[in-house]
Image: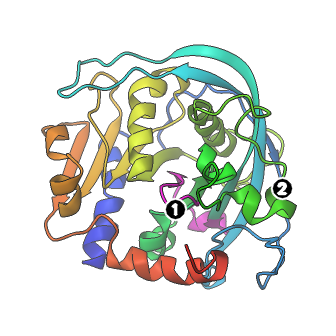
Amino acid sequence: MRKILAIAVLGILSLAALVMPVGGSPVASAGSPNPTVIGPIAANFPPDTPHNYPFFATNLDLASKGYVEEEYFIEGTANRYNIPPGTLPPIDPLPTATVISSGHHYKTRIVVRRPIDPWRFNGTVLLEWQNVTAGYELDAMWIPTAEHIMDAGYAWVGVSAQYVGVHGFPAPLPNQGLKAWSPVRYGTLDLTAGYTVFDDSLCYDIYSQAAQAVRSPVGVDPMGGLKVKRVFAIGASQSAIKLTNYYNAIQPLAGVIDAYDFSVSGGPFRTDLGIKKFRYLSETDLVALDQIARRAPDSNELRSWEVAGAAHFDYYSQLGTAPLAVRDLPPAA
């Protein structure tokens, strides 16, 4: 089952090759500005009491695989977008987003796990939209597939794009946002433009700028000089829903993503963009999360895998998450 999940979660990699050979040109990226990149941010290990290290830093032996983990801060100004709602069945094509307002300052983080040796890098960055459903950031797609990612030579980049991940749930709910977890390390992060924007509408532009920072760096290069050929958007559950919005409404404007991998959620999708998409769904998703209503036939752009007997949060995700939660979260979490 572990091999099935690893292949399913990353199945889009072979799909993209149908139209983009290795070394092929990435999509145009003129639609999104570059953020300012700061770092890598120094970390104190073993994990210290003030939490001056990356939240949920991997406990895997990256060095044995020739990999390194680094954390960077990115900052800039982001647009707020009006995201048209999707419909079931979808109106095709779904409308593209419109800008509500511009110039909203933000500062957030990205976590980079990449090969050290350029010859180990296969040219593809897996840009994960960090999942925040639990009130803290979870590397939902890295954790169960890390061995495959490293064996195959991909770079993984986690993007802190959403309010809850940085600022936590509003009181009186438990607060496990980055700022509360480590004021020393993350106290300057802000996804609210100085506490003026609270609707998460900056997240889409922030994600685009993170993609631009790794594919076309200006100044600090978070990829350490690796030549990036492709950036694939990946996300699980709530993050797959956010990426559905991004694909339908923002992709035509930003143009910084080459292909998409939606895990345990996602859809419906517009069909006029010509971008490869892979969707992996567990039995839980089909039964409990209304994914049957979001089914679409396979095409040259979309493949959907529905895996009988699989769970939304699988056994290997639990095994990988548990020790990180013990280290970085209070017992109540």
Q: Residue shown at 46%/28% (left/top)?
A: 251
Instruction: Locate residue 276, reporting x and y percent.
Output: 33, 39
Q: Residues within 10 Å of mark 2 (few under 14, many from 20)?
A: some
Compare residues 141 and 52 and report the one nearer the observer. Answer: 52
128 left or right, relative to 185:
left
Magenta segment? 114-136
Magenta span contains residue 116: yes
Q: Is residue 60 above or below residue 143?
A: below
Residue 171 pos. (x, y %)? 64, 51
Marks 1 and 2, the one that precedes in the sequence: 2
Q: Is residue 187 magenta?
A: no
Is the residue 53 above or below the residue 11 in the image? below
Examine the rendered structure and indicate whether residue 236 appears above or below residue 271: below
Which disc, if any, is residue 39? 2
Question: 39 or 149, which lies in front?
Answer: 39
Query: Could you tell me if the residues under marks 1 and 2 are in contact, i.e. CB atoms within 8 Å?
Result: no
Numbered circle sitting on residue 154: 1
Specify the quadrant that holds the C terminus.
bottom right
Left or right: residue 203 compared with residue 39: left
Label 1: element kind:
loop
Q: Position of residue 319 (x, y in %)?
A: 43, 82
Instruction: Indicate the amino acid at tag 1.
Output: Tyr
CA gap, disc 1 and disc 2 = 21 Å
Res 21 seen here: no
Of 98 and 258, the residue lying toward us: 98
> Across the whole image, how many numbered discs are drawn on residues?
2
Q: Residue at x 78, y 85 (%)?
A: 46
Q: Residue at x 45, y 38 (%)?
A: 258
The one nearer the camera, 22 or 136, is 136
